[in-house]
Image (tube, rainbow, N blue to C red):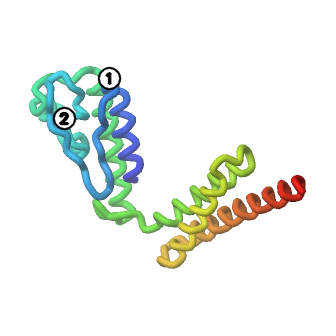
Amino acid sequence: MKLTKYFFVLLLSVFAMNTSSAFVVATPATIVEVKPVDKKESIFKQLTAEEMFTMPRADIEEKIGRKLKFKERLGLKIIQKAAKKAEKRMKKKGIKKGQQNENLFGILSISLGGAGLLSALFSGYGALSLGIAGLALGIVGLKRDEPKRILSILGIVFGGLVILFALLVLIVLAALLI
């Protein structure tokens, strides 16, 4: 849910910025405010993410001292709609605002383990490090007693397969060189 919100902030930043400038930094723990510097700068440098999600367009225009461009209006409407949908989903699932995902280590474990497995099968670059990270995060997820343990278990399996595949490749290469 929060990832969707941050994805849209990033997406809007790309569409609305005139030049390649700094993004508004929004993490689950903090939202960094960027002070207004110039009236012609993008609204994403002048507003926090929370303000973009909640303030109506007229208040935003008043705060930045100019009317929004078409791209900015469109992007603002999209991000506010996505934020409302995400908030409704969070209320429906009983998740409070600011509450962290309880399956974080399991999700990271299966993601990194799966990415390592795909990397090992197709290219090999970075596969071992992704596999080790997936395995370690899966173990941490199991020790934390996360609700969906299957994610951590699959992350451990994928990470273990990557490590076994890497060891197999090393053994075959060592046998060929001897």
Residue 157: x and y in percent read 68, 67
Q: Is residue 60 above or below residue 90?
A: above
Task: Please rate how many residues cluster around mark 2, counting C-alpha atoms within 10 Å: few if below 14, some from 14 to 19, many from 20.
Answer: many
Work out how far the residue at label 1 is from the one at label 2, CA to CA, in angstroms: 15 Å
**Residue 162 in picture, x, y percent from top left:** 70, 59
- Viewer-nearest residue: 80 or 159: 159
Residue on which the image places disc 2: 46
Between 175 and 96, the residue placed more toward the observer is 175
Give the secondary structure at mark 1: loop
Q: Quadrant of residue 152?
A: bottom right
Residue found at the very far front of the displayed protein:
178
Type of amino acid at the residue the image marks with label 1: Thr
Residue 7 sits above or below residue 152 on the image:
above
Q: What residue does disc 1 label?
A: 19
Residue 170 % position (x, y)? 78, 58
Among the two numbered marks 1 and 2 on one chain, the one whose residue lies closer to the N terminus: 1
**Residue 160 drawn at (x, y percent):** 69, 66
Q: Nearer the viewer, residue 149 or 96?
A: 149
Q: For numbered disc 2, what is the local secondary structure?
A: helix
**How many numbered discs sit on the rendered protein?**
2
Residue 56: image quadrant is top left
The amino acid sitting under disc 2 is Gln
Pick the front one: 95 or 137:
137
Relative horizontal placement of residue 5, taking residue 139 as reference (left or right): left
Which residue does the image show at 71% across and 44% down from the upper left? Answer: 123
Instruction: Relative to 27, say whether 37 is above or below.
Output: above
Q: Residue at x 35, y 43 (%)?
A: 82
Q: Determine which quarter of the picture holds residue 131.
A: bottom right
Judge from the rendering whether residue 159 lies leftward or rightward of residue 85; answer left or right: right
Q: Residue sitting at 10 percent across and 26 percent down? A: 65
Say if 138 sits above or below 124 in the image.
Answer: below
Q: Residue at x 37, y 38 (%)?
A: 10
